[in-house]
Amino acid sequence: MGPAIVRRLQPMTRFEKAANLFVVVVPFIAFIAAVVLLWNRLVDGSDLFIFFIMYCLAGLGVTIGFHRLLTHRAFQTHKPLQYFWAILGQMAVQGPVIDWVADHRKHHAHTDQPGDPHSPHLHHQEGWKGALVGLYHAHMGWLLVNHGTAQRSQYARDLTEDPGMRKINRNFHWFVLLGLAIPFLMGWAIDGNLKGGLTALLWGGPVRMFFQHHVTWSINSVCHFTGRRRFDVEDHSTNVFWLALPSFGESWHHNHHAFPRSAEHGLRWYEIDVSAWIIKAMQKVGLAWNVTIIPPERQQQKLAAHARDKAAA
């Protein structure tokens, strides 16, 4: 296996930690600046429209592309569409696609156990201080400790053997820049001036990243700490309804851990899952196939097992 597809086992380098810290801090500063601009009415509807478009594109790239397609193979699609979703996901600035997939597969292999990259339950402090330490680690602290260190050859071998995916992974920084250039050009085109491009860049770039990051990180932290559970699973995953819409259905996280290969995370009619709706639409027009759907009977079996365990306790 060539050097381009072998993942080192060493801890994160100083440069990687600094880069992640930069990605955490800069969107936060941009968010503060955006609040000031909005307060002074220097933001118009086009900026918010571009924010929404970029949030959806990059966010669905993560939920449909990185997560359900590439990590869990919940459905299949044409190779160019795989690459398209991977490119969109990289615009969310959550790390290169192969690293993201490897980290997430490692999370599922060791959920809330030693080896989980971002569990809030592996710190030995007790009480509310211990809870805060765990939540901080799961939410963003892990980005400075073990983000991107899962062994690619073990957890993402299928992607490392795909030349196109390796190329997308290797050019991560260029796709991040593309995710900034698109809102700038959209703003300039809509408003017809540089100011329009710059304010659109602010809202469609780092401000969008700020919201996107914290919604995604909340799946790691909040959805392993508080919420509702109904299936027989051994980890601490939960469903959190108020995150369902901004996370495009990812916050039905307990459902996901019960059935990791399911293309649907919202398993009941009232559980909003925009990502699943889009996958089903792709299936109807022939752009997705072998879509994994968990039948009600199988869900009922896991519910029954959970009920028996609660009764025994």
Image: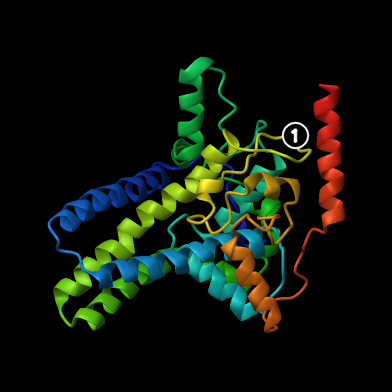
The answer to whether residue 160 is visible is no
**Image quarter of the C terminus:** top right
Front residue (pair 265, 57): 265
Give me the residue at 72% from left, 63% from top. Answer: 74
Q: Image quarter for residue 294?
A: bottom right
Query: Compared to 35, does 224 lie above or below?
Result: above
Give me the residue at 25% from left, 62% from top. Answer: 202
Toward the front, the furthest residue is 270
Residue 241 drawn at (x, y percent)? 56, 47
Q: Give the color scheme: rainbow, by chain, secondary structure or one colour.
A: rainbow
Q: Secondary structure at mark 1?
A: loop
Front residue (pair 257, 230): 230
Front residue (pair 22, 166): 22
Q: Which residue in the protein does label 1 denote?
A: 234
| Left or right of 85 on screen, residue 183 | left
Residue 296 drawn at (x, y percent)? 82, 56
Q: Image quarter for residue 160?
A: bottom right
Query: Compared to 208, does 185 lie above or below?
Result: below
Number of marks in the rendered image: 1
What amino acid is at disc 1?
Glu
Query: Compared to 160, does 280 lie above or below?
Result: below
Neighbourhood count class around disc 1 (C-alpha, 10 Å): few under 14, some 14–19, many 20 upward = few
Give me the residue at 60% from left, 80% from top. Answer: 80
The answer to whether residue 288 is visible is yes
Residue 248 drawn at (x, y percent)? 54, 59
